[in-house]
Amino acid sequence: MLKPVPLAPSSSAGYNSPVPPVSQTIRVTVLFFGRLKELTGHPEHSIEFTDAPTIEHLFALYAARHPELAKYRSSVVASRNQEFAAWDTPLRSGDEVAFLPPVSGG
Amino acid sequence: MAKLPHDDIYQLVREPIDMAALARHVRAPDDGAMVIFDGFVRNQSHNRPTLYLDYEAYESMALAKMREIGAQLHEKYRIHRVSVVHRLGRLEVGETSVFIAVSAPHRAAAFDACRFAIDTLKRTVPIWKKEYFEDGAVWADGELPPAPAATPRAKPAS
């Protein structure tokens, strides 16, 4: 299951335990626009994971924090590194993910 | 993505769009036609008088998508130069929010390309407008851009 890594170093390893294997941390930048930005209260977040999440996981994590987000799931498209992306796209460290409501330029 | 001619213009701006200067730039001596689209702020929305609009964009992606549209225009139509400029921030009624100009040796290609450009922009470029009225504000109904349904399974790491 996905868990954001706490930013402070964890001290959960017991004494006498060997140095725990360093799990690779994945850091992703997350952007919200339009009404989604108003719902989450922030345009831009940085978040860390121990396991590679997909875009869907990432959205679910924010929907858990901001329950109103969930009802917009079907009217949101996601992008990864400025390209529209499928919800099952796996993320890599350094990726920039954005959640975009229906566009209304022009 | 196909290479764009260096004299095309794709911009997001926060000041009024200088349409005359852009038109002069796009209109070249070896062309025979230029089609201009001037999109501006309507004074009402669903019969509610509009006070003003506020535009925001995912700027890096919006510019990339505008340039992508330009590349498609050059691929699909026999045109010469393109200018696509969108304004962001607060816009009053009557002010131009989007300006597109396409020049071509002959008019048909310029008309078709200009139409394709504005239609595609409105569907795929990540820009949003909030409409302000006497009694509140709403995000304008928009279009959901087409996105891939699922990632191809055997996609090699890049």
Image: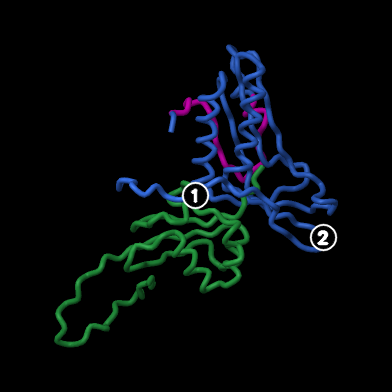
In this view, the residue in front, A34 or A20, is A20
Tell me the element at label 1. loop
Residue at (66%, 17%) from the top-left corner?
Answer: B107
Residue B134 disc label:
2
- In the image, taking residue A9 as reference, residue A106 lies left or right, namely right
Chain A as rendered: colour: green
Instruction: Find the magenta span and give its range.
Output: B3-23
Residue at (34%, 46%) from the top-left corner?
Answer: B155
Q: Is residue B12 inside the magenta stretch?
A: yes
The image shows residue B86, relative to residue A92, as above or below, that is above
Amino acid marked by disc 2: Glu
- In the image, taking residue B137 as reference, residue A102 lies left or right, namely left
The image shows residue B105, relative to residue B136, as above or below, that is above
Q: Which residue is mark 1?
A: B149
Q: Which one is in front in this view, the residue at disc 2 or the one at disc 1? A: 1
Q: Chain of mark 2?
A: B
Residue A55 disc label:
none
